[in-house]
Image: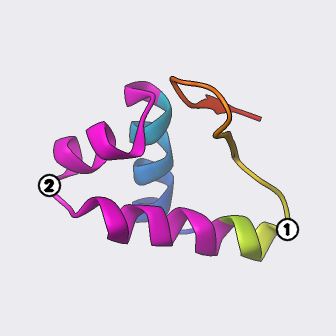
Amino acid sequence: MNLKRAQYMKTIAECGSITAAAKKLFISQPSLSQMLRQLEKEIGTPIFDRSISPLRLT
């Protein structure tokens, strides 16, 4: 994981949603979601519990 990904993950955790984090980071929501899916695939486990709102770290 690089520093950019770490910052994105931190922002998602603080905001509680991917959409709010994307707005705060000035990037598109689909690209942030794609980065999250790719990272979860690389480590082999979900990072956030998406079944609840706001998102929580697993």
Q: Which residue is mark 1?
A: 44
Q: Quadrant of residue 15?
A: top left
C-beta proximity under 8 Å, tags 1 and 2: no
Relative depth, front residue between 2 and 47:
47
Which residue occupies the extreme left position in the image?
26
Q: Quick one: SS at disc 1?
A: loop
Q: Which residues are magenta?
A: 14-39
Q: Position of residue 13 (x, y in %)?
A: 50, 32
Q: Residue furthest right?
A: 44
Quadrant location of the N terminus in the rendered image: bottom right
In the rendered image, which quarter is residue 29 located in? bottom left
Q: Is 34 or 8 nearer to us in this picture?
A: 34
Where residue 56 sits: x, y (%)? 63, 28
Kind of residue at badge 2:
Phe
Identify the residue shown where x is 74% and y is 73%. 41
> Residue 5 placed where, x, y %?
47, 62
Mark 2 neighbour density, 10 Å: few (under 14) some (14–19) many (20 or more): few
Going by the image, does 2 lie left or right of 51?
left
> Residue 26: horizontal and vertical position, in percent?
14, 55
The quadrant of the rendering that contains the C terminus is top right
Q: Which mark is residue 10?
A: none
Q: Is residue 25 magenta?
A: yes
Main SS of the magenta part reads: helix
Cα separation between marks 1 and 2: 28 Å
Label 2: state its secondary structure. Answer: loop
Amino acid at pointer 1: Gly
- The residue that mark 2 highlights is 26
Is 57 on the left-hand or right-hand side of 4?
A: right
Residue 15 lies left or right of residue 38; in this view the side is left
